[in-house]
Structures are given as structure tokens and as C-alpha cells.
Amino acid sequence: MTLIAGNWKMNGLAAEISEIQSIVSGLANYSGADAMICPPALLLPAAVKAAAGSALAIGAQDCHAEVSGAHTGDISAQMIADAGAVAVIVGHSERRSDHGEQDADVLAKAMAAHQAGLNAIICVGETDRQRDAGDALKVVGSQLDGSVPGGNPDNIVIAYEPVWAIGTGRTASEDDIAAMHDHIRNWLASHFGDAGQRVRILYGGSVKPANAAEILSVPNVNGALVGGASLKADDFLAIVAAA
Ligand code: 13P
């Protein structure tokens, strides 16, 4: 089933749990897609409580690769699972650029997520400079090589987010999305065989109610990772409705 996941990034105070409550009520009208919200870590327990018993899953935005220890300010995958979340985003381009995360770090985080029983939403995507140089497929292929754990892929989701499309209002063309998602699908099939066909590949980058149906109809687009438009229940639900 299509997955619409919302990444709230560093947005949301306690008052915004009301948006989660509205999403929970609104989701009762749609059964065509799985829905997830990834709020800031401090809101995880309240979000899990608001979504309890509903179709809305709650995920986190990052985890540390270690289970516990002397890592001031960090949060482990086990803590995220303990809070009741079911997934964690790893390797978002903002983590890669703001915190210098490399593919090996992302791989370690994805493995930590799996060890804690969480699904790992592994992000990949090229910069505009890399796309202009004709290197987009190569860059994403190498990110997949370095960031995706081997073994059973049933607990991974890949999110393709071209860096230049994030928060800019620009989206990749349907042809470019189709070519990249086909490339990712081939990579998954060559690494995981039939199981690789089942892995969901999300598109992310300025997905909004107005463009969601078009993007979600592209072959091998199995959902969306939504930033800004996931902050308001009405916009998020309109994207779920478009799936
Ligand atoms: P926007 O939808 O705000 O462009 O963000 C996309 C994103 O980075 C989701 O992880």
C-alpha cells in the first residue's frame, strides 16, 4: 500500500498535537494509503498517545547508531521504540548537510533501527550541482550502496528526495522521478531479489495537495515523504486522499 509519511522537521510545539488529532479523525475517511507522522522527538510520546488505536503510525526523524552511552543530546533507536514509534527516518539530506552524516553513519543508524524493531526510512538524493553534471543516478546508486543494510529488506523504505526540491517549491519532472525510481527499484531487485520488489520507494521534495496525485501516479512511486505540507492536517489529509 502507498505510504504517505510526514516529516515535521524542527517544527511543532505541544499545541500542534491537535494537528495529529485532526489527522487521526480525518484518516477514518481514507483507507487507500498508510499514513505516518514523524514529529520532533520531544513530541513522540504525545503523538503516540494521540494516534493510539488509529491508522496513523508515528515515526522519529533520526537516531543514534548506539543503543546507549555517553552521547550527550542524542536519542537511540531503542528509546524511540520505547516511546511507541514504529519507524525512524535516517540519512535525511538535512542530517547529511547539517551534521556531516556520511553513508556509513546512515547505514549504522539503519541497522540500529532494525535492531530496535523499527522500520528505517532511508533517504537518498542528489544536489542540483550533481544533477546538472549528469551524475544524479550515479550519486543515488552510491548512496544506496553505502546506506542500505543487507539482509531482509521488509523493514526498510527508501525515500528519494532531490536536495534541490526540498522546501523550494520545485519538484522533479515526472520523467526524472520515473527514471530515478526505476533506477532505485533495479538496485533493490539486484540486491534483494523478489523481496526488493516489495520495498516502498517514496518521493519527497515540495509534495503538496496540488501535485500529489500526479507524482503518486508515476511508476515505482509508492508514496511520499512530505515536509511543509504535513504540518497542517488538512494539507496532509488531502495528500493521503490523492494516493
Ligand atoms: P518539503 O516537502 O517541505 O519540500 O520537504 C521535503 C522533505 O525534506 C521531507 O523529508
Image (cartoon, rainbow, N blue to C red):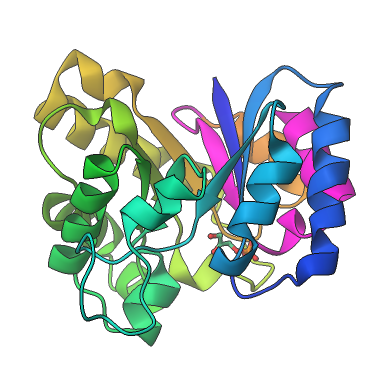
Above/below status of 7 relative to 223: below
Residue at horizontal 80%, vertical 36%?
24
Q: Is residue 145 left or right of residue 98?
A: left
Question: Residue 75, image x and y in percent?
Answer: 38, 68
Q: Is residue 138 visible?
A: no
Q: Residue at x 65, y 24 (%)?
A: 33
Residue extent of the magenta highlight: 219-243
Q: Nearer the viewer, residue 242 or 50?
A: 50
Q: Where is 49 relative to 18, above or below?
A: above
For this view, does 228 lie left or right of residue 195? Answer: right
The answer, for residue 61, to whether it is visible in the render is yes
Q: Residue at x 84, y 44 (%)?
A: 21
Which quadrant of the figure has residue 69? bottom left
Q: Is residue 139 magenta?
A: no
Q: Could you say where residue 72 lies in the image, as x and y percent from the top left?
A: 32, 85
* Residue 15 locus on image (x, y percent): 85, 66
Q: Does residue 126 appear left or right of residue 165 in this picture? A: left
Question: Residue 224, position in %: x, y?
Answer: 57, 43
